[in-house]
Image (spheres, rainbow, N blue to C red):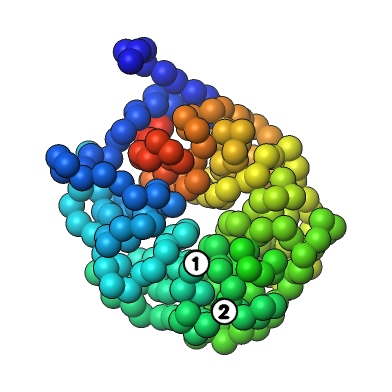
Amino acid sequence: MSDENYTVILGDRRYAIHRKWARLPAGESFGFLSDLMVDDAGRVHVAQRGTDRPVLVFERDGRLSGSWGEGVLAEPHYLNPGRDGSILVADRDAHQVLRFDGKGNVVQALGRRHWPSLDAPFNHPTAAADAPDGDIYVADGYGNSSVHRFSADGTLLRTWGGPGVGPGTFTTPHAVAVDREGRVLVGDRENNRIQVFDREGTFLAEWGDFYHPMQIWIDDRGYIFVTDQIPRISLLSPDGKLIGRCRGAINGAHGMAGDAEGNLYLSELPPQEITKLERLN
């Protein structure tokens, strides 16, 4: 194995690549690494499928310090930071979106567990994200081709989408994020694009030049990071202009998130591992 020290660049920032950043105890191995997020304390929460420990927690140095979701999560697909330190998890094959507090307790559930519904919440949902005012947006992307908007108390307010390739339709809406302007960004994976909507679901824009976009993460500058299956990471300005691009991942990152220092973390497709992109400048 090469001992070269690899670096990549995204916009005006350079990163050092650290493979196998997250360390498991001897004899243990990862399940399918689906996604990750960084909490306010800098700990990295990693969602994995096919194991009895659905979410692993790693400290800043890559050391495993705990887990949560045991006996509660079936197949966690994506997780995103929620309000007041909570975590939103799309439990894909249980057809639910669950909100956990910082101790790993369920404090909110959207959808009827193990009760899939065609053209209604949910049918293998993929991702969920909070808006600044507490509304919740869910990409319902494997069985359905839609996005749902809920109020903070879980009341369904609106559904939009449907199968297709035109504006406002989807083929596997795989990721969802809400930016600082309140726009709803949806990773329309099989249509190779990011679609942008207002809070009501009105189509605003389409950003292309992706190959099966997987996850969307927005930093404190409002810059938008997208991982796709080239594999590569793209950096967009808030208006959707491409301002940076690199590989970073080995075979493709299904999940991606960053921390307050500007470091990035990738949940890699096989071989399963967590890669850290350490910000150098």
Can residue 249 be seen? yes
Secondary structure under the numbered disc 2 in the rendered image: loop
Q: Label 1 neighbourhood size at 10 Å, few (<14), some (14-19), many (20+)?
A: many
Q: Label 2 neighbourhood size at 10 Å, few (<14), some (14-19), many (20+)?
A: many
Please give the name of the residue rendered at 67% of the width and 78% of the height, measured from the top-left corner: 118
Image quarter for residue 138?
A: bottom right
Tag count in the figure? 2
Q: Can you identify the residue that label 2 sits on?
A: 116
Q: Which mark is residue 144?
A: none
Q: Quadrant of the C terminus?
A: top left
Q: Is the residue 112 above or below the residue 190 in the image?
A: below
In the picture provided, is 53 more to the left or to the right than 231? left
Residue 154 lies, in percent from the top left, at 52, 84
Nearest the viewer among 50 and 99 is 50
Q: Can you identify the residue that label 1 sits on?
A: 92
Please give the name of the residue rendered at 74% of the width and 73% of the height, measured from the top-left corner: 160
Please give the name of the residue rendered at 39% of the width and 45% of the height, measured from the top-left corner: 259
In the picture provided, is 20 more to the left or to the right than 241? left
Mark 2 and mark 1 lie on one chain; the one further toward the N terminus is 1
Please give the name of the residue rendered at 56% of the width and 27% of the height, measured from the top-left corner: 246
Q: Is the residue 17 above or below the residue 30 in the image?
A: above
Nearest the viewer among 14 and 32 is 32
Q: Is the residue 150 above or below the residue 225 in the image?
A: below
Q: Is the residue 150 above or below the residue 55 in the image?
A: below
